[in-house]
Image (spheres, helix red, strand yellow):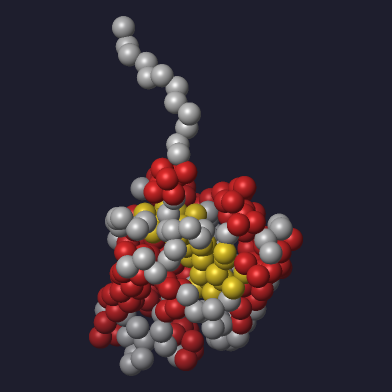
């Protein structure tokens, strides 16, 4: 006969605090933006705003009853589209009952340097090259960001960040946040959630890194699932940082979750 444990009274407050992450970070791609990528200051489309609302509702649902007691840090990457996203997220949190004083817009931890490919917005000619079918066929890509990811370093113009450099930047940012947590810089008594809004390149690369798969294989899978070979708008990763151990990262959003499951 199997042995059954007796029911207990549930976890104590100390156990809950120990299991609760010291910091939760949602790193999201911006919602769909205007089609002309040669415009650095392009904004969100109506569909892009809908994507943000959908993701914010999912975040609110995940946080549940904790919501009014959480301090939120919202962060943009300095572009018009991510700044618009932050303002929309703030409006949604306010409408959900989060007090205004609990919503903060500073530079914060992991979000500080989560930008897209550095130098890309300053080189429209290289963007045009990445979009050409001829170049994509040459490097074996199915889209412009995949063409960047597969480009040999010696074919990247000066000032354009390589995949290796972006990967190193990403890992350095994660290490900084983990160091802050381990040093007790985030109070365990305060529930803190950060929402960092960034770009498809860094989000897709981060997802591949956390899933342990080559970025071009992840892009191919995403292209089979959705309209793009990149992480979809307002989707990304959910990170949980713990005082006593390494971070945990999980996909956030329908398409990236499906890709992770299938891979």
In the rendered image of this protein, does residue 227 appear above or below residue 119?
A: above
Residue 196 as seen in the image, left or right of residue 150: right
In the image, 240 versus 47, the foreground residue is 240
In the rendered image of this protein, does residue 161 appear above or below residue 122?
A: above
Q: Position of residue 68 (x, y in %)?
A: 64, 56
Residue 250 as seen in the image, left or right of residue 42: left
Report which quarter residue 33 is drawn in: bottom right
Residue 167 as seen in the image, left or right of residue 63: left
* Residue 236 appears in view: no
Residue that appears at 51% across and 60% down:
190
Q: Position of residue 16 (x, y in %)?
A: 45, 44
In the rendered image of this protein, does residue 139 appear above or below residue 243?
A: below
* Residue 119 appears in view: yes
Q: Position of residue 17 (x, y in %)?
A: 44, 49
Q: Position of residue 118 (x, y in %)?
A: 41, 84
Report which quarter residue 153 is drawn in: bottom left
In the image, 259 versus 22, the foreground residue is 22
Residue extending furthest toward the right: 95
In the image, 106 versus 10, the foreground residue is 10
In the image, 36 versus 263, the foreground residue is 263
Residue that appears at 61% across and 82% down:
80
Report which quarter residue 186 is drawn in: bottom left
Residue 252 as seen in the image, left or right of residue 175: right
Residue that appears at 41% across and 19% down:
6
Residue that appears at 31% across and 7% down:
1
């Amino acid at each position: 006969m199997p042995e059954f444990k007796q029911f207990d009274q549930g976890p104590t407050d100390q156990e809950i605090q120990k299991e609760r992450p010291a910091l939760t970070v949602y790193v999201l791609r911006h919602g769909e933006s205007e089609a002309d990528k040669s415009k650095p200051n392009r904004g969100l489309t109506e569909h892009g705003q809908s994507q943000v609302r959908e993701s914010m509702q999912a975040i609110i649902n995940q946080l549940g009853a904790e919501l009014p007691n959480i301090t939120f840090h919202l962060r943009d990457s300095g572009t018009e589209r991510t700044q618009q996203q932050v303002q929309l997220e703030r409006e949604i949190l306010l409408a959900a009952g989060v007090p205004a004083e609990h919503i903060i817009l500073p530079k914060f931890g992991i979000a500080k340097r989560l930008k897209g490919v550095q130098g890309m917005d300053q080189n429209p000619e290289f963007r045009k090259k990445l979009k050409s079918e001829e170049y994509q066929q040459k490097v074996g890509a199915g889209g412009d960001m995949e063409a960047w990811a597969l480009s040999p370093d010696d074919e990247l113009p000066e000032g354009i960040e390589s995949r290796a450099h972006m990967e190193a930047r990403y890992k350095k940012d994660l290490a900084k946040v983990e160091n802050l947590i381990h040093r007790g810089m985030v109070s365990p008594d305060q529930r803190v959630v950060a929402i960092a809004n960034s770009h498809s390149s860094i989000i897709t690369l981060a997802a591949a890194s956390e899933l342990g798969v080559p970025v071009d294989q992840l892009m191919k899978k995403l292209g089979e699932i959705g309209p793009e070979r990149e992480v979809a708008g307002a989707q990304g990763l959910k990170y949980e940082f713990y005082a006593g151990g390494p971070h945990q990262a999980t996909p956030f959003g329908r398409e990236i979750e499906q890709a992770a499951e299938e891979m």
